[in-house]
Amino acid sequence: MKKIILVAAIAVFAFAACNKDNGNENGGGNTVLEATFELSGEIGDLTYGEPVAVEGTLTSASPIDAVSFTGVDDEGNAVGEEQKYEASGTEISGEFFPDTKDMTQLQVTLYSGDAKASFNFPTGTVTGDAKGDVYINNTAQFMADTLVFTHENSPELFPEENTGNGSDTKSFFSMHGVEIDGQVEHILSLNQLRSVDGQNASFVFCNVLQNTANKGTITGQRGYAFQYAYNLSGGTIGRQCDAYEVNGHAIVPDNTDRNFGFSLVRGAWYEGYDADFYTAIDRIFVNIGEANTNYEKLKAFWQLGELQRTYDNATLGEENEPTNIATQTYLRHYLDAGTKTAGDARENFRAGDYIIIRSQRGTAENPEYYYGIMQIRQIPDITGVLDANGDFDPELTPSLFLKPFYLDIKTQCEILD
């Protein structure tokens, strides 16, 4: 839980000067800023990766345009990353993410152009460990794969059992990642997932057309879909061929991210549009920046955690009006898009919509939840595959295979050993 500093007043004064000084105590050849800063409250013990509110009042001879917080040791040496924010006026309010257990002080630095002044304040100890990692990919590309021939669906081509083709098409996603050739991968091909027997596979992106076991055309549903990887061989999803064992390896259901689900958050185009919820998810998503450094990862992990703390807190054991995010195991681009359906084909999601993803790990007695948000950025044009009734023509639907589908993905994930 976020910690708030109790109101008190501690005044610390910086050395002041008006000249350039390449060796001054504020370092780096910057002009020393003539300023004072009063921190509101004492900083007690901190929890690693959980933000603490830092508030204070300043006086300065020059307007302040930025402030930063850094964990430093007893000598004032930085042992954590500088966490910089825009600032204005005389009141400073921001969040500091404890990103090192070696800090004994918090350094607050005020910036005015190329001038700066730093102030150090004692802190308590930092305890705890990172609860996870994050994966961010602003241009994640998936392609729906064509039928993969194996002994099970093409014995004339592969007469020997457990033999067949593979595929290098990137159509699978692993929320928690898979180590392939020494690198952690999240967007994977069938060949890559087979090589690790389906470890951590979360979903497959596909183009529903036929049952790939018997090659029969699927009549009830058709077109693009996301399907969780635990059940590739069932239902009208058309990826039975991915589940077959070939050369001693298969996507083993119990190895996959089996407690995984999707929750769709549609934009204003949708008749049941929930403006408040969409805006809230959009805010969380947009506010998450890059995650290249330890501090950036800790911050992004915490920001994504708002999905659980605010919108899915029943998973935290909340008993007083708990919130829930309902998930499902597949998402179709179009509903009732087959040639034999009760209703007319209709869109289920568009570019700009969000998909919340959730994975349950741990044990039934002590579950751990991980959350992510994917924004649909670009969907291949499907107008050319629709027949006169607006349904997906089975003769034209194959044109949707191997077309790039783009997502912007920001997700929590486990720390791989």
Image (cartoon, grey):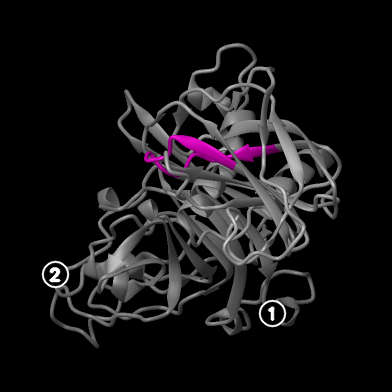
Where residue 122 appears, as percent x and y from the top left, is: 51, 30
Figure label count:
2
Residue 325: % across, % down? 60, 34
| One can see residue 349 in this view | no
* Dot in front, 1 or 2: 2
Nearest the eye: 39 or 368: 39
SS category of the residue bearing label 2 = loop
Q: Amino acid at mark 2?
A: Gly
Residue 182 vs 65, above or below: the answer is below
Vertical placement of residue 6 versus 165, above or below: above
Residue at 66% from the left image edge and 57% from the top image edge: 341
Start and end of the magenta stretch?
94-107
Where does the image place residue 84, in percent across and percent down from the top left?
A: 65, 52
Which quadrant is home to the N terminus?
Answer: top right
Crowdedness near tag 1: few (<14), some (14–19) or many (≥20) residues, C-alpha within 10 Å: some
Q: Residue at x 41, y 45 (%)?
A: 132
Q: Which residue position is annotated with label 1?
A: 385
Is residue 73 left or right of 144 when viewed as pictured? left
The vertical placement of 48 against 227, above or below, is above
Dot 2: within a 10 Å radius of its alpha carbon, few (fewer than 14), some, or many (20 or more) residues? few
Would residue 50 appear left or right of 157 to someone viewing this image? right
**Circle 1 SS class:** helix
In the image, 136: left or right of 77?
A: right
Residue 93, disc: none
Q: Does 97 lie within the magenta span? A: yes
Which of the pair 120/25 is nearer the observer? 25
What residue would you read off at disc 2? 248
